[in-house]
Amino acid sequence: MVRLAQLREKISSTEAKLAVIGLGYVGLPVACLFAEKGFEIVGVDIIEDRVDLINEGQCPIEGYEPGLPELLSGVISKGSLKATTDYRQLQAADIILIDVETPTDDQHIPQYVALRAACQSVAKVMKDGALIIVESTIAPGTMDKVVRPILEEASGKISGADFFLGVCPERVMPGKLLQNLKKMSRVCGGETPEVSQAMKLLYRHIVEADLDPSNLVTAELTKTAENTYRDVNIAFANELALICQVAGADFLEVRELVNKSPGRNVLMAGAGVGGHCIPKDPWLLAYGAKDEVDLQLIPAARSVNESMPSHIVSLVESALREAGKPLKGARIAVLGYAYLEESDDTRNSPSEVFVNLLGDKGASVVVHDPYVKEYQQLLDECLEGCDAMVLMVAHQMYRSLDLKRCRFIMRTPVIVDGRFLIDPVSALHEGYIFKGIGRPRYA
């Protein structure tokens, strides 16, 4: 493979020209890290405002991302990274990384609009010998059934001869983007072992953990399986919390005692599971089997986790009933709208579902979140005249609330805790009616 041998040499010397499509939570930090290592990077995104911000050295990701704003500013100043909306700037790229969204619809079918569009655009400009790597999370079989056919048909080139294909799913979480990219292992799935080795050589520039060579479908399966595994385990924790609540035990204590047994690791329960990955990746994994496997566990876990915002609504109704107030017409303060603490990422946020459910029941809702722009009001203003305060996200500022002050501001002293942030005894001492997921009824 003369072309791959030449590409390996260029990768080793950092002379390979890289392109990154999609400058969001994955693509932007990836582009910055490779640029920091001496590669010339062109980043492509369809959002002009984001492109403009990046070219000005300003980070468009507003959540807490240690090191990323400084790194972006530095590589932009050096000229190592340039952002554009023009795919024609990719004509010289030796390696093209695709980092676009891969959602599912309400029937749990993968929606590859962005991926297909990116492949169509890449096919029109990619040069002979280019290596195309999909970093997005995709259903097993997508590289063979979607990506390769589009690239071959639109370019007239043959995969494995005129260009090369790989898939290396990201493993990142908002708030830890750079850390995860450096420290988390990656699966380098190539269409041939030689492609996998070239991918390992590339990612070794930025990844300090294991880089495991494999084939395309194994890499696709690994990423969807690991997020599904987490989803199933969160579902168990959530269901255990519901049982503890009814039985009169504290979930935190039960969890601690169970986890003392070797090999046990009960995860934290909570008000719901959000983000771009976990709510959809189980369905991507399931789609790999289509209708050939009678799936039971994965759909059941999804059902449990999707039900948690509704359960929080029931806790709010119960607490207000004790206070002598109906939910209809009540003013509810929702603390936290992002799906994850210390982040501005609202994708598939449980709080969004929760707010809509409250609205359907006639409640008046006011939202506070220190990271999400539209909800960055003063907390005191949010709590003014409220009949309940509901904690939906474990932002650091919510861990040290002045309960005495909050009670003075609120109209009705009700707290509903969906993230184990409030000590029930302290809340009761301050005169609150307290309800919390996984907390005994008498709390």
Image (tube, rainbow, N blue to C red):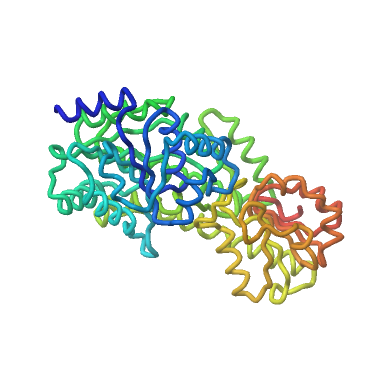
Asked which quadrant contains residue 312, the reply is: bottom right
Relative to residue 81, is residue 71 drawn left or right?
A: right
Relative to residue 76, is residue 435 drawn left or right?
A: right
Query: Residue 386, how many percent across, how many down?
Result: 77, 66
Name the residue at 72% across, 47% down.
397
Name the residue at 52% across, 53% down.
274
Query: Residue 417, how many percent across, how many down?
Result: 69, 54
Q: Nearer the viewer, residue 285 or 119?
A: 119
Up/down of 87 relative to 8, above or below = below
Asked which quadrant contains residue 308, the reply is: bottom right
Relative to residue 345, is residue 283 drawn left or right?
A: left
Q: Nearer the viewer, residue 261 or 34?
A: 34
Q: Quadrant of the N terminus?
A: top left
Query: Residue 86, how many percent across, how many down?
Result: 33, 52
Q: Nearer the viewer, residue 393 or 436?
A: 393
Q: Answer whether residue 282 is visible to the viewer in this image.
A: no
Up/down of 242 relative to 130, above or below = below
Asked which quadrant contains residue 216, the reply is: top left
Q: Answer whether residue 418 is visible to the viewer in this image.
A: yes
Q: Nearer the viewer, residue 386 or 372?
A: 372
Tally of numbered tags: 0
Query: Residue 281, how many percent across, how many down?
Result: 39, 50
Relative to residue 399, is residue 279 drawn left or right?
A: left
Name the residue at 42% across, 33% down.
35
Name the residue at 70% across, 47% down.
421
